[in-house]
Image: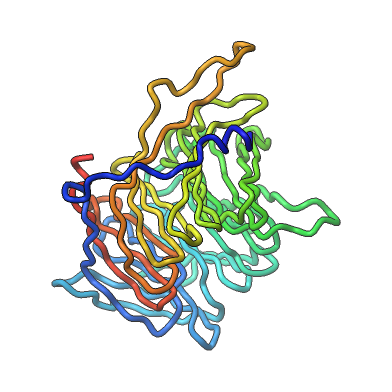
Amino acid sequence: NAEYMGDQNGTAAEMDTTVAPQLIEHLNKSLTFTPFDTKWIPNSARFVLMGQHPRATGTIQVYELASGELKLLQEWEKPHGIKCGTFGATSIAQRQLAYGDYNGNLVISDLEHGQVAFSVQGHESIINAIDGCGGLNIGGGAPELVTGGRDGCVRVWDPRQKEAVVSLEPAEGETPADCWTVAFGNSFNDEDRCICAGYDNGDVKLFDLRTMTLRWDTNVKNGVCGVEFDRKDIQMNKLLVATLESKFSIYDLRTFHPEEGYAGLTEKAHNSTVWLGRHLPQNRDVFMTCGGNGALNLYKYSYPSQRSVKDADGIARGVPGTVELLNQREVATQPIVSFDWHPDRLGLAVMAALDQTCRVFIVTKLNTL
């Protein structure tokens, strides 16, 4: 599979930037702490910002877009730094934030009053990543959370239970690889659901929660900083994998070959770590990558004329598509570690960078792609 991938390495085609979508900074806020994650609060013009103070305590802030400025509505200090958060497993009525902290705690908190609705020691040490599914009417089945930790474990949680529903742990005796990123996908009915996990040793593992089996694993040779399915609530279609050494890969998940696995392409980008990639909620073939160079890159994926071909033995093999760089812009002096598209407002996004800033961006002309 490595050789097959190698042929696909390349540089994305570039669009005429005079007609391309423009990346416009709308608002900018300097912070007194290091931000690690930011998420829009569902059905609102508010977002939540999570991070860590210099004194190693955590912070949750709620901001509102009001009359052309960012207005701080609420702020809570927590005992430990907060690394990641999600609204993916909450109902639209409750809009509770689930987050993971530096002490390994998984917490679900009510943002109206700051009260903790659920708390459990989920991992031995820092929870690096979290994702939710089944809430907000996105994805079939019950609401669930998935967490990935420095202890190398990936755990799936039902927010009504204190024990993990599924726990994927390193084999006894081996040095655990740090799990850096997790994501839900394939949740297109009440039974099917998959999780993908990326590790610091370059492993990418795709686990089926219905059959409780490892569907696929590969190694991309560099630490995996971010994974995301282009949609959570459809049959698996594409998977974006962002890594160290300025690379990201996209795998077509519709055709599995017993020897070669899924077909994919690899692109060089940002001249530094690609921290994450986020697909546009209104168009799953458009995505933004965030770089260690403080830049945003906007891409569009195009499918090949045939998504699968038969090999010599008559077995279907996937055919990767191509990506086109629509526009790019350097916006921060340090890595961009969080990016969230607004689910309802096309082109509105909030991002956080390690230069202790939070920015709201507007991306234009996305409806023309």
Relative image position of residue 8 (x, y in whole percent): 51, 36
257 vs 167: above or below: above
Above or below: residue 115 compared with residue 33: above
Is 2 on the left-hand or right-hand side of 90?
right
Who's the residue at 51% across and 45% down the image?
Answer: 184
Q: Quadrant of the N terminus?
A: top right
> In the depicted view, which residue is nearer to us: 267 or 131?
267
The part of the image, by quadrant, that contains residue 199 is bottom right
Residue at image coords 30%, 51% = 343
Indicate left or right for 29 with 108 as reference: left
Query: Residue at image x 48%, y 47%?
Result: 228
Counting from the top left corner in percent of width and height, residue 261 is at: 61, 30
On screen, residue 290 above or below 369 = below
Where is the C terminus found, in terms of image quarters? top left
Note whether 152 is above or below 29 in the view shown. above
Q: Nearer the viewer, residue 306 or 160?
A: 306
